[in-house]
Amino acid sequence: MSSPTSDPHGHPGPSSQSDFHGPYPQTGTPGQYWASTGGYDAPGAGPQDYVPPRPGAPRQVTAQDRTTATLTHLTPLLAMLFTVGWLSFAGPLIMWAVHKDNNDFVRRSAAAAFNFNLSMWLLGVIGWVCVLTLLLIPVGVPLLLFAFFVQIILHIVAAVRANQGEIYRYPMQFLNVLS
C-alpha cells in the first residue's frame, strides 16, 4: 500500500500540508516567497545601488538639455537671416523665459546668448547711426561688418560648447541683463 507521503501514483509527496507549495520546486524557506525566487523583487523594493541626489545638488546635464542649449545659441543666427539682425536677441529671450525655473543649464546658456546679442544689437544700432550720418560711414560700415561676423563665429562656437555640455561665456558681452 502507499505511504502517507506519496500520491496514488507512487510519487513522493510533501511530508506535511504546510510544506506544500505546489507542483513546482520552491527556493527559500516556506513563508518567504519573495526571498530568492530569481524573479522580481518584492513590491516596493527599489534598486539596491540607487542613491538619490542630495537636495540642492546641481542636476546632471542631459542630452535634451544640451540640444535645447545648442538651439538657443543657434536661434540668433536664424533671426539674423529673417530680421537682418534686429531681433537676434528674441530667440534666447524666449528660451530663457521658458526654461528659467526648471533647467539651470539652459537658463544660463540662454541668458549668456541674450546678453551677448543685446550687446551686439547696441553695437549695430551705433553702426547704423554712424552710416546714416553719412560723415561717419567709414566708421559705421566696418563696425556693422565686425558685429555681423563676430556674431556668426561666436554663436557657432557657443553652440558647439553647449552640445558638449559646457556653458559658454561670450568674450564681448558688454551688458549683463539676464542671469
Image (cartoon, rainbow, N blue to C red):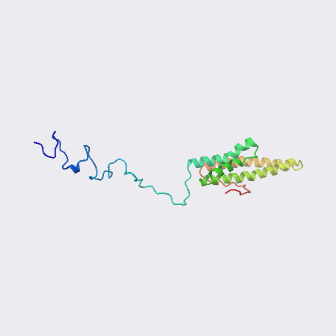
Name the residue nearer the viewer: 69 or 96.
96
* Residue projecting furthest to the front: 17
The percent position of residue 141, horizontal first and vertical second, equals 82, 47
The percent position of residue 94, horizontal first and vertical second, equals 67, 49
Name the residue nearer the viewer: 46 or 76.
46
The percent position of residue 4, horizontal first and vertical second, equals 14, 46
**How many numbered marks have been drawn onto this rendered protein structure?**
0
Residue shown at 22% from the left, 51% from the top = 18
User: Which image quarter holds the N terminus?
Assistant: top left
* Residue projecting furthest to the right: 135
User: Which image quarter holds the C terminus?
Assistant: bottom right
Residue shown at 67% from the left, 54% from the top = 111
The percent position of residue 56, horizontal first and vertical second, equals 55, 60
Residue shown at 73% from the left, 44% from the top = 80
* Residue projecting furthest to the left: 1
Q: Is residue 25 left or right of residue 10?
A: right
Q: Is residue 132 left or right of residue 22?
A: right
